[in-house]
Image (tube, rainbow, N blue to C red):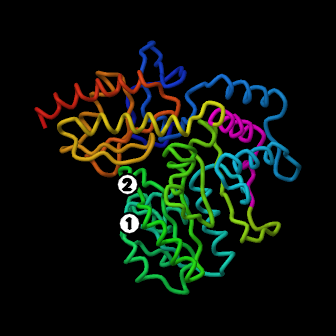
Protein backbone atom coordinates (compact mmCIF):
# COMPACT_ATOMS: atom_id res chain seq x y z
CA UNK A 1 0.00 0.00 0.00
CA UNK A 2 1.15 3.56 -0.67
CA UNK A 3 0.00 6.90 0.68
CA UNK A 4 -2.87 8.73 -0.99
CA UNK A 5 -1.09 11.62 -2.69
CA UNK A 6 -2.90 14.74 -1.44
CA UNK A 7 -0.07 16.88 -0.01
CA UNK A 8 2.59 18.85 -1.90
CA UNK A 9 5.69 18.03 0.12
CA UNK A 10 9.00 19.77 0.72
CA UNK A 11 11.87 17.29 0.57
CA UNK A 12 12.62 17.75 4.28
CA UNK A 13 11.94 15.27 7.06
CA UNK A 14 12.26 16.71 10.57
CA UNK A 15 13.65 14.13 12.99
CA UNK A 16 13.94 16.26 16.12
CA UNK A 17 12.69 19.53 17.57
CA UNK A 18 13.27 21.78 20.56
CA UNK A 19 11.73 25.17 21.25
CA UNK A 20 11.54 27.06 17.96
CA UNK A 21 13.98 24.79 16.13
CA UNK A 22 13.74 21.66 13.99
CA UNK A 23 16.48 19.28 12.81
CA UNK A 24 16.30 17.03 9.78
CA UNK A 25 17.88 13.59 9.41
CA UNK A 26 21.13 15.13 8.18
CA UNK A 27 21.35 17.35 11.26
CA UNK A 28 20.46 20.57 9.41
CA UNK A 29 18.76 23.04 11.73
CA UNK A 30 15.65 25.07 10.79
CA UNK A 31 13.96 27.96 12.57
CA UNK A 32 10.25 27.20 12.83
CA UNK A 33 8.16 30.32 12.24
CA UNK A 34 5.04 28.34 11.31
CA UNK A 35 4.54 25.67 13.97
CA UNK A 36 2.76 23.27 11.64
CA UNK A 37 -0.22 25.59 11.00
CA UNK A 38 -0.07 27.42 14.37
CA UNK A 39 -0.18 24.18 16.34
CA UNK A 40 3.05 24.60 18.33
CA UNK A 41 2.04 27.07 21.02
CA UNK A 42 4.57 26.46 23.79
CA UNK A 43 7.54 25.31 21.71
CA UNK A 44 8.58 21.88 20.51
CA UNK A 45 9.32 19.31 23.22
CA UNK A 46 8.77 21.70 26.13
CA UNK A 47 10.11 19.90 29.25
CA UNK A 48 6.89 20.29 31.27
CA UNK A 49 4.79 19.11 28.34
CA UNK A 50 7.00 16.06 27.72
CA UNK A 51 7.00 15.16 31.43
CA UNK A 52 3.22 15.41 31.78
CA UNK A 53 2.47 13.51 28.58
CA UNK A 54 4.95 10.68 29.13
CA UNK A 55 3.95 10.37 32.76
CA UNK A 56 0.30 10.07 31.79
CA UNK A 57 1.11 7.51 29.08
CA UNK A 58 2.82 5.36 31.71
CA UNK A 59 -0.33 5.39 33.84
CA UNK A 60 -3.26 5.20 31.39
CA UNK A 61 -3.50 6.62 27.89
CA UNK A 62 -7.11 6.06 26.97
CA UNK A 63 -10.54 5.05 28.03
CA UNK A 64 -13.85 6.13 26.57
CA UNK A 65 -16.27 8.73 27.90
CA UNK A 66 -18.33 5.99 29.52
CA UNK A 67 -16.25 6.45 32.68
CA UNK A 68 -15.20 9.39 34.82
CA UNK A 69 -12.03 11.15 33.62
CA UNK A 70 -11.12 13.76 36.20
CA UNK A 71 -8.44 15.21 33.91
CA UNK A 72 -11.29 16.61 31.81
CA UNK A 73 -12.56 18.57 34.80
CA UNK A 74 -9.07 19.89 35.55
CA UNK A 75 -8.63 20.98 31.93
CA UNK A 76 -12.02 22.72 31.89
CA UNK A 77 -11.33 24.53 35.16
CA UNK A 78 -7.89 25.78 34.07
CA UNK A 79 -9.13 26.78 30.61
CA UNK A 80 -12.05 28.71 32.07
CA UNK A 81 -9.81 30.53 34.52
CA UNK A 82 -7.11 31.46 32.00
CA UNK A 83 -9.48 32.41 29.17
CA UNK A 84 -11.91 34.43 31.28
CA UNK A 85 -14.81 32.08 30.47
CA UNK A 86 -15.11 30.19 33.75
CA UNK A 87 -18.92 30.36 33.53
CA UNK A 88 -18.97 28.39 30.28
CA UNK A 89 -18.98 24.59 29.81
CA UNK A 90 -16.48 22.59 27.76
CA UNK A 91 -17.10 19.81 25.24
CA UNK A 92 -13.88 18.07 24.23
CA UNK A 93 -13.24 16.61 20.79
CA UNK A 94 -10.24 16.03 18.52
CA UNK A 95 -9.83 18.81 15.95
CA UNK A 96 -10.92 22.26 14.86
CA UNK A 97 -13.24 20.94 12.16
CA UNK A 98 -14.92 18.67 14.69
CA UNK A 99 -15.24 21.56 17.14
CA UNK A 100 -16.97 23.67 14.49
CA UNK A 101 -19.28 20.80 13.50
CA UNK A 102 -20.40 20.42 17.10
CA UNK A 103 -20.78 24.17 17.63
CA UNK A 104 -23.05 24.44 14.59
CA UNK A 105 -25.01 21.43 15.75
CA UNK A 106 -25.43 22.91 19.24
CA UNK A 107 -26.68 26.18 17.76
CA UNK A 108 -29.27 24.30 15.68
CA UNK A 109 -30.35 22.17 18.64
CA UNK A 110 -30.81 25.36 20.65
CA UNK A 111 -33.03 27.38 18.32
CA UNK A 112 -34.30 24.73 15.92
CA UNK A 113 -33.09 26.59 12.83
CA UNK A 114 -30.97 25.62 9.80
CA UNK A 115 -29.54 28.71 8.12
CA UNK A 116 -25.89 29.63 8.74
CA UNK A 117 -24.15 32.86 7.83
CA UNK A 118 -20.41 32.65 7.11
CA UNK A 119 -18.03 35.07 5.42
CA UNK A 120 -15.80 35.50 2.40
CA UNK A 121 -12.36 34.02 3.02
CA UNK A 122 -13.63 31.78 5.82
CA UNK A 123 -11.94 28.49 6.63
CA UNK A 124 -13.69 26.34 9.25
CA UNK A 125 -12.48 22.83 8.43
CA UNK A 126 -12.67 19.88 6.05
CA UNK A 127 -15.58 17.88 7.48
CA UNK A 128 -19.14 18.03 6.19
CA UNK A 129 -20.78 21.17 7.59
CA UNK A 130 -17.45 22.85 8.32
CA UNK A 131 -16.60 22.54 4.62
CA UNK A 132 -20.00 23.94 3.66
CA UNK A 133 -19.21 27.02 5.80
CA UNK A 134 -15.72 27.37 4.26
CA UNK A 135 -15.21 29.73 1.33
CA UNK A 136 -13.20 27.35 -0.84
CA UNK A 137 -14.97 25.35 -3.54
CA UNK A 138 -11.81 23.29 -4.16
CA UNK A 139 -12.26 21.34 -0.92
CA UNK A 140 -16.04 20.95 -1.12
CA UNK A 141 -17.30 17.73 -2.72
CA UNK A 142 -20.81 17.56 -4.21
CA UNK A 143 -22.02 15.73 -1.11
CA UNK A 144 -21.01 18.74 1.01
CA UNK A 145 -23.35 21.03 -0.88
CA UNK A 146 -26.19 22.60 1.10
CA UNK A 147 -28.50 25.53 0.68
CA UNK A 148 -28.25 26.30 4.38
CA UNK A 149 -25.08 28.44 4.24
CA UNK A 150 -25.02 32.06 3.08
CA UNK A 151 -21.67 33.80 2.53
CA UNK A 152 -21.41 37.54 3.12
CA UNK A 153 -18.48 39.94 2.83
CA UNK A 154 -16.05 39.73 5.74
CA UNK A 155 -16.01 42.81 7.98
CA UNK A 156 -19.21 44.15 6.34
CA UNK A 157 -21.64 44.79 9.19
CA UNK A 158 -24.21 46.44 6.92
CA UNK A 159 -24.48 43.36 4.71
CA UNK A 160 -25.02 41.23 7.80
CA UNK A 161 -27.76 43.49 9.13
CA UNK A 162 -29.48 43.39 5.73
CA UNK A 163 -29.54 39.58 5.58
CA UNK A 164 -30.43 38.69 9.16
CA UNK A 165 -33.90 37.37 9.90
CA UNK A 166 -35.68 34.79 12.07
CA UNK A 167 -34.46 31.89 9.89
CA UNK A 168 -30.78 32.34 10.81
CA UNK A 169 -29.50 29.69 13.20
CA UNK A 170 -25.93 30.96 13.66
CA UNK A 171 -23.29 33.37 12.45
CA UNK A 172 -19.81 31.81 12.42
CA UNK A 173 -16.68 33.93 12.13
CA UNK A 174 -12.96 33.61 12.80
CA UNK A 175 -11.45 36.01 15.31
CA UNK A 176 -8.67 36.43 12.76
CA UNK A 177 -8.95 34.69 9.40
CA UNK A 178 -5.85 32.55 8.98
CA UNK A 179 -5.92 30.79 5.62
CA UNK A 180 -7.26 33.95 3.96
CA UNK A 181 -4.00 35.71 4.81
CA UNK A 182 -4.42 36.90 8.42
CA UNK A 183 -7.47 39.16 8.08
CA UNK A 184 -8.49 40.61 11.43
CA UNK A 185 -12.20 40.78 12.27
CA UNK A 186 -12.71 44.41 13.23
CA UNK A 187 -14.00 45.24 16.69
CA UNK A 188 -17.01 46.99 15.19
CA UNK A 189 -17.82 43.99 13.00
CA UNK A 190 -17.77 41.58 15.95
CA UNK A 191 -19.96 43.92 17.99
CA UNK A 192 -22.43 44.10 15.10
CA UNK A 193 -22.56 40.30 14.91
CA UNK A 194 -23.30 40.14 18.62
CA UNK A 195 -26.00 42.77 18.34
CA UNK A 196 -27.87 41.26 15.39
CA UNK A 197 -27.64 37.74 16.83
CA UNK A 198 -29.27 39.03 20.00
CA UNK A 199 -31.91 40.83 17.98
CA UNK A 200 -32.89 37.78 15.90
CA UNK A 201 -32.22 34.94 18.33
CA UNK A 202 -29.26 33.55 16.36
CA UNK A 203 -26.11 32.10 17.91
CA UNK A 204 -22.72 33.80 17.58
CA UNK A 205 -19.93 31.27 16.99
CA UNK A 206 -16.31 32.40 17.25
CA UNK A 207 -13.86 30.13 15.48
CA UNK A 208 -10.68 30.64 17.51
CA UNK A 209 -9.04 27.45 16.25
CA UNK A 210 -6.02 29.30 14.85
CA UNK A 211 -6.32 32.70 16.55
CA UNK A 212 -6.96 31.42 20.08
CA UNK A 213 -4.82 30.20 22.96
CA UNK A 214 -2.91 33.45 23.42
CA UNK A 215 -1.67 33.79 19.85
CA UNK A 216 -3.24 37.22 19.31
CA UNK A 217 -1.92 38.77 22.53
CA UNK A 218 -5.24 38.08 24.24
CA UNK A 219 -6.35 34.59 25.12
CA UNK A 220 -8.91 34.86 22.31
CA UNK A 221 -8.69 37.33 19.44
CA UNK A 222 -12.35 38.34 19.80
CA UNK A 223 -11.64 39.64 23.31
CA UNK A 224 -10.22 42.84 21.79
CA UNK A 225 -13.82 43.68 20.83
CA UNK A 226 -15.42 42.75 24.15
CA UNK A 227 -18.11 40.84 22.25
CA UNK A 228 -18.93 37.63 24.10
CA UNK A 229 -19.91 34.75 21.78
CA UNK A 230 -22.35 31.97 22.52
CA UNK A 231 -19.91 29.30 21.36
CA UNK A 232 -16.12 29.38 20.98
CA UNK A 233 -14.21 26.68 19.11
CA UNK A 234 -10.59 25.77 19.86
CA UNK A 235 -7.94 23.29 18.71
CA UNK A 236 -4.44 23.69 17.14
CA UNK A 237 -2.39 25.34 19.94
CA UNK A 238 -4.59 23.66 22.56
CA UNK A 239 -2.47 20.49 22.56
CA UNK A 240 0.89 21.72 21.19
CA UNK A 241 0.81 18.92 18.62
CA UNK A 242 -1.37 16.36 20.39
CA UNK A 243 -4.79 16.15 18.63
CA UNK A 244 -7.35 17.89 20.83
CA UNK A 245 -10.16 20.35 20.24
CA UNK A 246 -13.11 21.75 22.09
CA UNK A 247 -16.18 23.93 22.23
CA UNK A 248 -16.67 26.51 25.00
CA UNK A 249 -20.42 26.68 25.54
CA UNK A 250 -22.41 29.56 27.02
CA UNK A 251 -24.59 28.88 30.09
CA UNK A 252 -27.67 29.60 27.96
CA UNK A 253 -27.32 26.13 26.37
CA UNK A 254 -29.03 23.20 28.04
CA UNK A 255 -27.14 19.90 27.84
CA UNK A 256 -28.85 16.56 27.52
CA UNK A 257 -27.26 13.15 27.41
CA UNK A 258 -26.78 11.79 23.91
CA UNK A 259 -26.82 15.25 22.30
CA UNK A 260 -23.08 15.13 21.49
CA UNK A 261 -20.53 12.37 21.58
CA UNK A 262 -16.99 11.34 20.68
CA UNK A 263 -14.84 8.24 21.03
CA UNK A 264 -11.44 9.82 21.43
CA UNK A 265 -12.30 13.35 22.56
CA UNK A 266 -11.14 14.18 26.09
CA UNK A 267 -9.00 11.06 26.47
CA UNK A 268 -6.35 10.91 29.18
CA UNK A 269 -3.40 11.79 26.93
CA UNK A 270 -5.23 14.65 25.21
CA UNK A 271 -6.18 16.15 28.56
CA UNK A 272 -2.64 15.78 29.91
CA UNK A 273 -1.35 17.64 26.83
CA UNK A 274 -4.01 20.34 27.16
CA UNK A 275 -3.35 20.87 30.87
CA UNK A 276 0.42 21.10 30.28
CA UNK A 277 -0.12 23.77 27.61
CA UNK A 278 -2.26 25.88 29.95
CA UNK A 279 0.27 25.48 32.76
CA UNK A 280 3.09 26.76 30.57
CA UNK A 281 1.04 29.62 29.09
CA UNK A 282 0.20 30.81 32.62
CA UNK A 283 3.58 30.25 34.28
CA UNK A 284 5.64 31.76 31.45
CA UNK A 285 3.25 34.64 30.69
CA UNK A 286 3.03 33.61 27.06
CA UNK A 287 -0.03 35.69 26.17
CA UNK A 288 1.83 38.88 27.02
CA UNK A 289 5.01 37.59 25.38
CA UNK A 290 3.08 36.90 22.18
CA UNK A 291 1.80 40.47 22.20
CA UNK A 292 5.22 41.99 22.78
CA UNK A 293 7.20 39.82 20.35
CA UNK A 294 4.52 40.04 17.69
CA UNK A 295 4.40 43.83 17.93
CA UNK A 296 8.18 43.92 17.58
CA UNK A 297 8.18 41.72 14.47
CA UNK A 298 5.35 43.66 12.82
CA UNK A 299 6.97 47.03 13.55
CA UNK A 300 10.24 45.88 12.01
CA UNK A 301 8.66 44.29 8.92
CA UNK A 302 6.55 47.38 8.17
CA UNK A 303 9.77 49.31 7.53
CA UNK A 304 10.97 47.04 4.75
CA UNK A 305 10.73 48.03 1.10
CA UNK A 306 8.63 45.60 -0.90
CA UNK A 307 6.14 44.98 1.92
CA UNK A 308 2.66 46.18 0.95
CA UNK A 309 0.88 45.51 4.25
CA UNK A 310 1.41 43.79 7.59
CA UNK A 311 -1.72 42.38 9.25
CA UNK A 312 -2.43 40.57 12.45
CA UNK A 313 -2.19 40.68 16.21
CA UNK A 314 0.38 39.15 18.51
CA UNK A 315 2.12 36.21 16.86
CA UNK A 316 -0.49 35.72 14.14
CA UNK A 317 1.08 37.79 11.38
CA UNK A 318 0.40 38.13 7.67
CA UNK A 319 3.00 39.87 5.52
CA UNK A 320 1.62 40.90 2.14
CA UNK A 321 4.29 41.59 -0.48
CA UNK A 322 4.12 43.51 -3.73
CA UNK A 323 4.60 40.26 -5.63
CA UNK A 324 3.78 36.55 -5.31
CA UNK A 325 5.73 35.12 -2.41
CA UNK A 326 6.12 31.41 -3.25
CA UNK A 327 9.70 31.80 -4.52
CA UNK A 328 10.65 33.94 -1.55
CA UNK A 329 9.24 31.39 0.91
CA UNK A 330 11.20 28.65 -0.85
CA UNK A 331 14.42 30.64 -0.53
CA UNK A 332 13.71 31.29 3.15
CA UNK A 333 13.32 27.55 3.65
CA UNK A 334 16.17 26.16 1.55
CA UNK A 335 18.71 28.98 1.77
CA UNK A 336 18.01 30.52 5.19
CA UNK A 337 16.54 27.37 6.83
CA UNK A 338 13.36 29.10 8.06
CA UNK A 339 9.84 27.66 7.89
CA UNK A 340 7.03 30.14 7.10
CA UNK A 341 3.45 29.64 5.94
CA UNK A 342 1.47 30.41 2.82
CA UNK A 343 -2.08 31.73 2.41
CA UNK A 344 -4.85 31.68 -0.17
CA UNK A 345 -3.62 35.19 -1.00
CA UNK A 346 -0.56 34.34 -3.10
CA UNK A 347 1.26 37.50 -2.04
CA UNK A 348 0.96 36.81 1.69
CA UNK A 349 3.35 34.97 4.01
CA UNK A 350 2.02 33.78 7.36
CA UNK A 351 4.16 33.91 10.51
CA UNK A 352 2.83 31.67 13.30
CA UNK A 353 5.70 30.80 15.67
CA UNK A 354 5.58 29.36 19.16
CA UNK A 355 4.40 31.93 21.70
CA UNK A 356 7.71 31.67 23.57
CA UNK A 357 9.92 32.46 20.58
CA UNK A 358 12.93 34.46 21.75
CA UNK A 359 13.69 37.99 20.58
CA UNK A 360 17.03 36.85 19.14
CA UNK A 361 15.21 34.17 17.13
CA UNK A 362 12.82 36.81 15.80
CA UNK A 363 15.88 38.85 14.79
CA UNK A 364 17.28 35.88 12.86
CA UNK A 365 14.08 35.82 10.84
CA UNK A 366 14.01 39.59 10.33
CA UNK A 367 17.58 39.63 9.04
CA UNK A 368 17.01 36.70 6.69
CA UNK A 369 13.67 38.03 5.48
CA UNK A 370 15.13 41.44 4.67
CA UNK A 371 18.05 39.82 2.85
CA UNK A 372 15.87 37.55 0.72
CA UNK A 373 13.24 40.25 0.15
CA UNK A 374 15.82 42.65 -1.30
CA UNK A 375 17.18 39.95 -3.58
CA UNK A 376 13.79 38.61 -4.65
CA UNK A 377 12.36 42.07 -5.29
CA UNK A 378 15.03 42.67 -7.90
CA UNK A 379 13.92 39.60 -9.87
CA UNK A 380 10.14 39.80 -9.29
Tell whether 73 sits left or right of 375: right
Segment colored magenta: 261-281
Give the residue pinned by disc 1: 155
285 in relation to 359, above or below: below
The image quadrant where one finds the C terminus is top left
SS for dot 1: loop
x, y percent for residue 182: 38, 50
Q: Neighbour class for label 1 at 10 Å: few (<14), some, many (≥20)? A: many
Main secondary structure type of the part rendered in magenta: helix
Mark closest to the chain's N terminus, 1 or 2: 1
Q: Neighbour class for label 2 at 10 Å: few (<14), some, many (≥20)? A: many
SS for dot 2: strand
Who's the residue at 37% across and 77% down the image?
A: 158
x, y percent for residue 81: 71, 48
x, y percent for residue 248: 67, 58
- Calculate the distance from the C-alpha at mark 1 to the C-alpha at mark 2: 9 Å
Q: Residue furthest left?
A: 378
Q: Is residue 280 magenta?
A: yes
The image quadrant where one finds the N terminus is top right
Whether residues under marks 1 and 2 lie with C-beta atoms below 8 angstroms apart, the answer is yes
Give the residue pinned by disc 2: 183
> Which residue is at the front of the view, 23 or 277?
277
Tell whether 90 sits left or right of 83: right
Q: Is residue 193 magenta?
A: no
186 in relation to 48, above or below: below
x, y percent for residue 137: 38, 63
Asked where in the image residue 254 lies, by quadrant, the reply is: bottom right
Amino acid sequence: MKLFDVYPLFDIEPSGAQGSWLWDKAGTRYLDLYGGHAVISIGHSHPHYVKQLTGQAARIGFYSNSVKISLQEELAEKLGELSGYSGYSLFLCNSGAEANENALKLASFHNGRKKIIAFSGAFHGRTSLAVAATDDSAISAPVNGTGNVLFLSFNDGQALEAHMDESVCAVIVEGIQGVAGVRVASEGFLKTIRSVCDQWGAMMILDEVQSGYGRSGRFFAHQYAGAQPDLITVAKGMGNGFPVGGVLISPRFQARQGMLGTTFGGNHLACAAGIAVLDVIREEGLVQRALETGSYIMDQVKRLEGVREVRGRGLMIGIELEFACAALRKRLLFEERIFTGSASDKNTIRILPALNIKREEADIFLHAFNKVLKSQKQTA
